Amino acid sequence: TASHSQSARDMEHGPGATENAREKANKEAEKLKKGMYRLTFVTGVRRGAGTKARARVVLCGETGKSESFLLGGRDDDAGGFITGSRRVYYVNTSNYLGEIYRVDVELADYSIAEVGCRWFLDQVEVYHEW
């Protein structure tokens, strides 16, 4: 009767219905293995708050830490983290990190003598993109 049920299902939904459902389930499982996160950086509005340096970012979650990401900087289309700006970046982690409980952010590749080597990072928002 198992083959009879299968045949009836194929007749009702088409011959590829079972394969399509399995493929869809595999894609959903893949999404959970990897993580795509939307990061929003809000730079403060006080004088000198912005920077042209890049930011090095690591996400810390329930199931581990992400690799290090370099974001922004003078080569960025927006010209870096400008005073009063909101910058949105998307990063892909090799694994789903679970609920994010900490975001480590530091300035990268700047020199002390360089103007704009400080940054007033007012807020960071993190969303897991499903």
Image: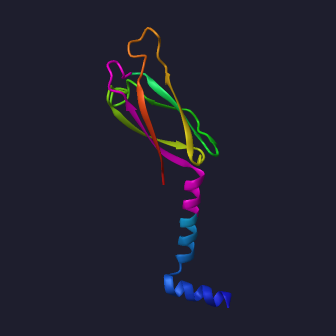
The part of the image, by quadrant, that contains residue 94 is: top right
User: Does the magenta portion include 35?
Assistant: yes
Q: Residue at x 49, y 19 (%)?
A: 109
The image shows residue 9 at horizontal and vertical percentages of: 55, 85
Rendered residue at 37%/35% (across/down): 87
- In the picture shown, does residue 101 fall above or below 105? below
Report whether 40 appears left or right of 10: left
Q: Is residue 87 left or right of residue 31?
A: left
Q: Is residue 86 above or below residue 63?
A: above
User: What is the quadrant of residue 18 in the picture?
Assistant: bottom right
The figure's colour scheme reads rainbow
- Which residue sits at x=43%, y=8%? 113
Counting from the top left corner in percent of width and height, residue 124 is at: 44, 36
Left or right: residue 78 versus residue 123 is left
The foreground one among 45 and 110 is 45
Residue in the foreground of this view, choosing between 49 and 10: 49
Where the N terminus falls, by quadrant?
A: bottom right
Label total for image? 0
49 part of magenta stretch: yes
Say if 31 sits above or below 1 in the image: above
Q: Quadrant of residue 30?
A: bottom right
39, 31: nearer the viewer? 39
Residue with the most extreme top position: 113
Highlighted magenta segment, given as a residue range: 26-51
Q: Residue 55's spot in the image, x, y percent? A: 47, 27
Q: Position of residue 71 (x, y in %)?
A: 45, 31
Q: Residue at x 54, y 84 (%)?
A: 10
